[in-house]
Amino acid sequence: MHELLIFVGLVLGANLLPAFGPPTWSLIVLTMLNTDAPAPLLIVLGAIAAASGRLLLALATRALGDRFLSKRSRANLAAARQALEAKKRNGILALGLFALSPLPSAQLFEAAGLARVRLLPFTFAFFAGRLVSYSLYALAADGLRATSLGETFKRELTSPLGIALQLGMLLGIVLLMRVDWAKRLKRSEPSRD
């Protein structure tokens, strides 16, 4: 039982990190290889802990944004949120991004928190998508038994592509706040003559 609590705590903590956290799938595989915990239980607990961590990260980012962002940045993000929520199709595409995207989810949740979008639908979509992806990783865990798990972790955390992607996503959040969304979105609206 204590192994499961440690696992949940590690997954929650990793998903609270704004960048460079170990991927949850690796924690699931590591736990599968070193305990007798059943894979379905680890998958469900991992998805719940990951979704909870990302939701808390988004809420913390939202609170920090409210405190430290300029009025202009907050207005720009509000315009972006309104554009996203204006069309149901936009919301569905965004939910799909959260559920299925291979992009680092920390920065996606940070952007959602800063833009003050409704977080529960995104968190649920993330949870559902992670149930699927974690199941696939758990099925592939047997292949990892033959490799060095330490090398796998090291490769994941230090790959130049992985680091560049994390940094690029952080830059994307900064750029998201710098765009004058109200001005850009008014320009792209069709005229109503």
Image (cartoon, rainbow, N blue to C red):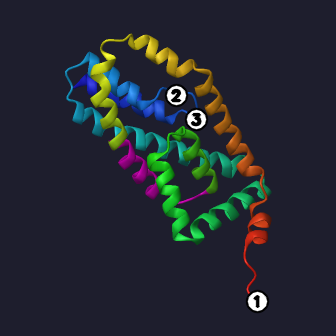
Please state which amino acid type lies under the numbered disc 2: Gly
The secondary structure type at the circle numbered 3 is: loop
Q: Earlier in the sequence, mark 3 or mark 1?
A: 3
Instruction: Tell me if residue 48 can be seen.
Output: no
- The quarter of the rendered structure image containing the C terminus is bottom right
Q: Residue furthest bottom?
A: 193
Would you place residue 129 above or below residue 9 in this image? below
Give the answer, above or below, for where 180 lies relative to 99. Answer: below
Res. 18 mark: 3
- Horizontal placement of 114 versus 44: left or right? right
Asked if residue 7 can be seen in this view, the reply is: yes
Q: Quadrant of residue 148?
A: top left
| Range covered by the magenta-colored residues | 116-131
Residue pointed to by mark 1:
193
**Label 2 neighbour load within 10 Å: few <14, some 14-19, many 20+:** some
Looking at numbered disc 1 in the image, what kind of residue is underneath it?
A: Asp
Residue 34 in the image, given as x and y percentages of width and height: 27, 16
Residue at 79%, 57% in the rendered image: 72
How far apart marks 2 and 1 lie (CA) works out to 51 Å
Look at the image and say whether residue 124 sits in the magenta stretch: yes
Q: Upstream in the sequence, badge 2 or badge 1?
A: 2
Q: Nearer the viewer, mark 3 or mark 1?
A: 1
Q: Residue at x 40, y 53 (%)?
A: 124
